[in-house]
Image (cartoon, rainbow, N blue to C red):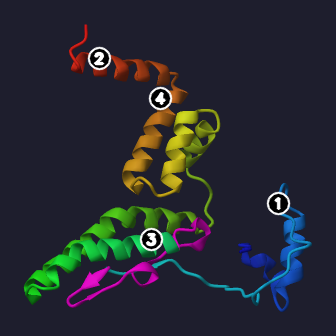
């Protein structure tokens, strides 16, 4: 799949027949995959407006999964994964209640709605905020610039970008690590953690 996401000021370049513009755009990118010998297997299409939207993942007698519950900026590639994940959460929360009463089912739906918001709400907010085209915040500049030279922070950033850790907790962990590195205390923090583990195990 080939995708190009550009600002609206370049819209006229891609209107009408987008294929030549897409190929030209890729040829101008450093280390980009070569498309000159590639052939399309489906029609090219574009979308001018793709707002990030969200709604409660469940209400009385109904539930939503995937984009029906939360549609985030496709640049981050989370749509399909979150669709499968939210369907799995729905099955876990609601499945056992399907043979029970309506009250039990509504309770299970509320549990699913809370879980969906807890797991994905912060990620969706961060993605929507980032996709506005704003400049990097001071916190983002600190984290990104420090991750470029600190492997541990780079790993935390990868986990965050892959949505393997929650939005709030992930941001806190990355900010804490970036601050320690910038202050030159990262090595001391690791030594303190190791010493704490030894003391907890009863080793002198």
Q: Which residues are magenta?
A: 57-79
Name the residue tied to disc 3: 82
Q: Secondary structure at mark 4?
A: helix
Q: Residue at x 45, y 67 (%)?
A: 124
Query: With 198 as the anchor, is 151 left or right in this view?
Result: right
Q: Secondary structure at mark 2?
A: helix
Residue 191, image x and y in percent?
Answer: 41, 18
Q: Residue at x 51, y 35 (%)?
A: 178
Residue 132, image x and y in percent?
Answer: 58, 69
Residue 1, image x and y in percent?
Answer: 71, 74
Q: Secondary structure at mark 3?
A: helix
Residues marked 4 and 3 touching at CB (< 8 Å): no
Taking the magenta stretch, the answer to whether it contains residue 61 is yes
Name the residue tied to disc 4: 180
Name the residue tied to disc 1: 32
- Mark 3 neighbour class, 10 Å CA radius: few under 14, some 14 to 19, many 20 or more: many
Report, in whole angstroms, how far the alpha carbon at label 2 lies from the one at label 1: 48 Å
Report, in whole angstroms, how far the alpha carbon at label 4 lies from the one at label 3: 33 Å
Q: Earlier in the sequence, mark 4 or mark 3?
A: 3
User: Would residue 169 be visible to someone looking at this image?
Assistant: yes
Q: Earlier in the sequence, mark 2 or mark 1?
A: 1
Name the residue tied to disc 2: 198
Q: Earlier in the sequence, mark 1 or mark 3?
A: 1
Q: Residue at x 89, y 63 (%)?
A: 28
User: Would residue 106 be visible to someone looking at this image?
Assistant: no
């Amino acid at each position: 799949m080939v995708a190009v996401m550009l600002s609206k000021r370049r819209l006229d370049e891609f209107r009408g027949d987008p294929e030549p513009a897409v190929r030209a755009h890729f040829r101008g990118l450093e280390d980009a995959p070569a498309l000159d010998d590639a052939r399309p297997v489906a029609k090219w299409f574009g979308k001018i407006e793709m707002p990030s939207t969200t709604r409660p993942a469940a209400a009385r007698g109904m539930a939503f999964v995937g984009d029906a519950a939360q549609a985030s900026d496709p640049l981050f590639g989370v749509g399909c994964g979150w669709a499968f994940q939210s369907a799995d959460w729905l099955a876990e929360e609601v499945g056992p209640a399907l043979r029970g009463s309506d009250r039990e089912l509504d309770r299970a739906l509320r549990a699913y709605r809370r879980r969906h918001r807890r797991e994905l709400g912060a990620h969706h907010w961060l993605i929507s905020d980032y996709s506005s085209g704003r400049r990097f915040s001071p916190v983002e500049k600190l984290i990104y610039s420090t991750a470029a030279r600190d492997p541990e922070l780079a790993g935390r950033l990868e986990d965050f970008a892959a949505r393997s850790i929650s939005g709030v907790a992930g941001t806190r962990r990355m900010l804490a690590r970036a601050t320690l590195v910038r202050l030159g205390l990262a090595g001391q923090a690791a030594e303190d953690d190791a010493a704490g583990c030894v003391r907890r195990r009863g080793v002198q």
